[in-house]
Image: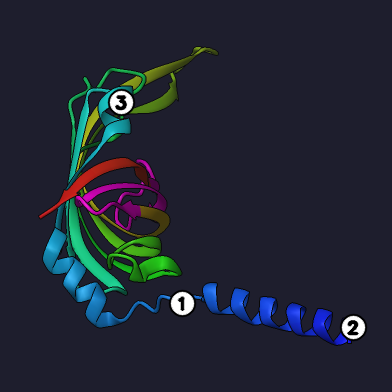
Amino acid sequence: MRYFLLSLFILLFTFGFSQDVQQVEVIKSDRQVSELLDEIGDQELKLDVIDLLTQPALNVGYEKINDAYSSFGADLYLNLNDISSADSWAEKISINPFYRFYFFNKTDFGGEGYFAEAFMKLSYLHYDRETWYNRSGSRSHDIMYEEIKTFDVAPGVGVGKKWVNRKGWTFEYMIGFGRYLFNNDGPEATFKGGISIGKRF
């Protein structure tokens, strides 16, 4: 009888404890994402803080969230460096339209998580080109500097990650590379990337 009562007590305790603890599983649907987008907005303005802090340059961007899985937008880059500066990029002005695909935790707020990006950089380039030559009858080499101003197009790809909070503030980092199509004697490759802070509206 003692063992029966002990077994009954253990069974009732286990049953009662299992009634108190319930597993809750939250499933995020596309409808919930749409409601969150309505709450915090599906458009975003952002500023690249790396360009602002490391050199006199301004890089601002706009992004429109299509849904939880994709977005499109454009960045505007203004290089305020002097052309003779050692830190200056060749791009003086560039417009960078892009299209993004979001992965993994994209369904939290839509347009959030890891992403892959395809972009097209339209750049006005301004740089000094060095030409080495020998004077006739001389063994020494001389250098001629020529100032080049031109326009070029660079398709490219990049990857990154974005976070969004419930107030609509965003934080992202990305890195990407492209290749100029028409510039044969200047920079062949171009870089796109940085760390940005933005706001949904």
- The amino acid beneath tag 1 is Glu
Q: Secondary structure at mark 1?
A: loop
Spatial CA span between label 1 and label 3: 52 Å
- The amino acid beneath tag 3 is Ser
Q: For the point 23% across and 51% down, which residue is it?
A: 152
Q: Is residue 161 left or right of residue 200?
A: right
Front one among 34 and 44: 34
Dividing the image into 4 quarters, which one contains the N terminus? bottom right
- The amino acid beneath tag 2 is Tyr
Q: Residue 25's mark?
A: 1
Q: Can you give x and y, in whole percent of width and height, for residue 170 in the image?
A: 27, 48
The residue under label 3 is 88
Q: Which residues are magenta?
A: 163-190
Front one among 153 and 75: 75
* Relative height, residue 176 to residue 22 (above, below): above
Marked residue nearer the N-terminal end (1 or 3): 1
Q: Can you give x and y, in whole percent of width and height, for residue 77 in the image?
A: 19, 41
Judged from this view, the residue extending furthest toward the front is 1
Q: Based on the picture, tell me whether residue 185 belongs to the magenta stretch.
A: yes
Q: Residues within 10 Å of mark 3 (few under 14, many from 20)?
A: some
Marked residue nearer the N-terminal end (2 or 1): 2
Q: Can you give x and y, in whole percent of width and height, for residue 9 in the image?
A: 74, 79
Between marks 2 and 1 in the image, the one whose residue lies nearer the viewer: 2
Marked residue nearer the N-terminal end (2 or 3): 2
